[in-house]
Amino acid sequence: MASDEEQWLDAQAGPVVRPYTLTQGRTRHAGEAFDLVSTVTTTNSYVSDPSALGPEHFSVLHLVQRPTTVVDIASDVNLPLGVVRILLGDLRELGLIAIRAPVPMQARKVDKNTLREVLHGLRGL
Amino acid sequence: MAYGGSELAGGMMTSRGHRAIKILLAGGFGVGKTTLVGAVSEIRPLRTEEPLTETSKHTDSTFGVERKTTTTVAMDFGRITLREDLVLYLFGTPGQERFWFMWDELAIGALGAVVLADTRRLADCFPAIDYFERREIPFIVALNVFDGARRYSMEDVRLALDLDPGLPIVMCDARSRESAKDVLIALVEHVLAQADEPALP
């Protein structure tokens, strides 16, 4: 047994529900792969069958009223990235969200003006 | 407030023309990646810190990191809004080899990488250096200066890591926001300098 000093309370004790319970045990999202910094936006479509969605789906839908990146969503809803991706895959299958790939920013392709903007931005922080 | 993540300083994020810059942060276990991301990010890191279990105590050497009782198993994630349409994302790559399957995904579209090194355990960053060299992802080496660690000259480190003469090595204190900023600036300057060079055949 844990001693008094080692007791885990509240958040320290871990989630009450195992994260992948929310996804019915699925670990792979539906449809095409998407980047971590892809932008997710609501399509403002009518949710025809709300019972098909869990509360976490609705949290995500609420967040993406504004275009939001996949990683920002995971940070905001405080769920593991893998779980968030599955939720996003579900919402995309239902046509409720659109996931847009990021503008490519690899070193070899990025334009120098953008790099200078990044430098300027970092120096001004 | 739970929805702060999509709030950007000075206005709304526009769906068109929003540019995301991805920078990777790699290095050995316990080298200070979580600390560095935390020092410079505007939001809390996205991570899964798990207690070191008996099993992982065997696989993770903790020499020089005696006080570490948790390890980052998922990833560190940080965000820095540079302008309303220009956001920098920092991803800490998982330090332990058994999570390396995540690297390839993280590396897609990355602008560059910072390899964080601890002079007490320099060899820990060899795999990261190999990885970025092989993928031709521009990177710099940042030496996290730990209290009580012996100071080495940059040239000693360059020799020990077998780095090209043109590859920047910077000293940093991963706990300091200013220092973490300087590391990122050094990386972007390096990428910009490389962009000026003709592409390799």
Image (tube, coloured by chain):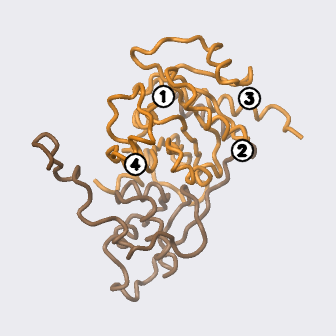
Residue of label 1? B180
Rounded to the nearest angstrom, the CA distance separating label 2 from label 1 is 24 Å
Residue A59 horizontal/vertical position (percent): 34, 68
- Circle 3 chain: B
Verify CB contact (< 8 Å) between mark 4 and mark 2: no
Rounded to the nearest angstrom, the CA distance separating label 4 from label 2 is 25 Å
Q: Earlier in the sequence, mark 3 or mark 4?
A: 4
- Circle 4 chain: B
Rounded to the nearest angstrom, the CA distance separating label 3 from label 2 is 18 Å
Task: Tell me if I can see residue A72 in this picture.
Answer: yes
Helix, strand or loop at mark 2: helix
Chain (orange) = B
Residue A9 horizontal/vertical position (percent): 16, 50
Q: Residue at x 53, y 32 (%)?
A: A122
Amino acid at dot 1: Ala
Residue of label 2? B135
Rounded to the nearest angstrom, the CA distance separating label 3 from label 4 is 32 Å
Task: Tell me if I can see residue B91 in this picture.
Answer: no
Amino acid at dot 3: Ala
Q: Residue at x 33, y 86 (%)?
A: A51
Helix, strand or loop at mark 1: helix
